[in-house]
Image (spheres, grey):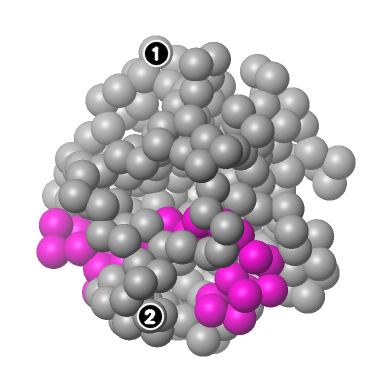
Amino acid sequence: MKIHFYAHASFRIESKDVVIVTDPYTPGPAGSNFAPIDEPADIVLMSSAVDPFHSDPSHVTEKPLIIDAVDIPPEGIDALGVPIRAYQTMESETWDYGERDAEPNAMYWFEIEGVRCFHMGDLGNPISPEHIDQLRGEVDVMFALAGGQPTIALPDLVQAIDAIGPKIVIPMHFYSPKGVLKILPLEEFTGLYPEDVVTFVRGSDLEVTRDSLPESMHIYVLKQSR
């Protein structure tokens, strides 16, 4: 399985049979200010259909199957042979969104080539004890919200990582000088861990197999490509 980091919360996860793109942002200066993806996928998984930083598949080519995780039923679904489960959540309950209220969104889990992946979507609060219990021991690769509020606060994120027990954590949703969001820089998250637990990958790609998973949790920081 190959993982490629586009930007923000958007990744390309590719196996020999299927390509998944997660949480595509609205590109360009009118949106995120990140460059378009402009690559094909079989499936686009979105944590909601209303947040332009997580829900714009217009620049993913070849007419992929688009799945809003908010609509996934409790028992999960099978999409092109990929099992997918969703965990219903909300944007921050304390953040001031101005003229609108906090919106629902969803975290999601899927398995590809025997590797169990968990994407935190746009969660704005601590992961609930119920969801922690459902995810504990069930995650190999965790795409973790590392930019602080209005998403999950970093102390709550660290507690969730410890409780869930992923083998690999890939930070996302942190400050980028290319972007427009004023969120925390990556170092605020990585600085909470010993240096030998964190690897700064030279590029945007990481290859993961069931057999290559580390014995204990390790953080891999990918460079954004867009």
Q: Secondary structure at mark 1?
A: loop
Disc 2 or disc 1, which is closer to the eye?
A: 2
Q: Amino acid at mark 1?
A: Glu
Instruction: Tell whether position 159 is magenta.
Output: yes
Nearer to us in this view, 63 or 8: 8
Q: Which residues are magenta?
A: 157-183
Q: Is residue 226 above or below residue 65?
A: below
Q: Secondary structure at mark 2?
A: loop
Q: Is residue 140 above or below residue 187?
A: above
Pointer 2 with pointer 1, Cβ within 8 A: no
Quarter in which the C terminus is drawn:
top left
Residue on which the image places disc 2 = 194
Q: Amino acid at mark 2?
A: Pro
Q: Is residue 19 above or below residue 56?
A: above
Residue at image position (54%, 15%) is 17
Looking at the image, residue 116 sits to the left or right of residue 12; the answer is right
**Residue 36 percent location from the top left of the image:** 23, 35
Crowding at label 2, few (<14), some or many (≥20) Cα neighbours within 10 Å?
A: few
Crowding at label 1, few (<14), some or many (≥20) Cα neighbours within 10 Å?
A: few
Residue at image position (41%, 32%) is 2
**Residue 214 percent location from the top left of the image:** 52, 54
Q: Which mark is residue 62?
A: 1
**Residue 141 percent location from the top left of the image:** 55, 51
The answer to whether residue 55 of the structure is visible from this angle is: no
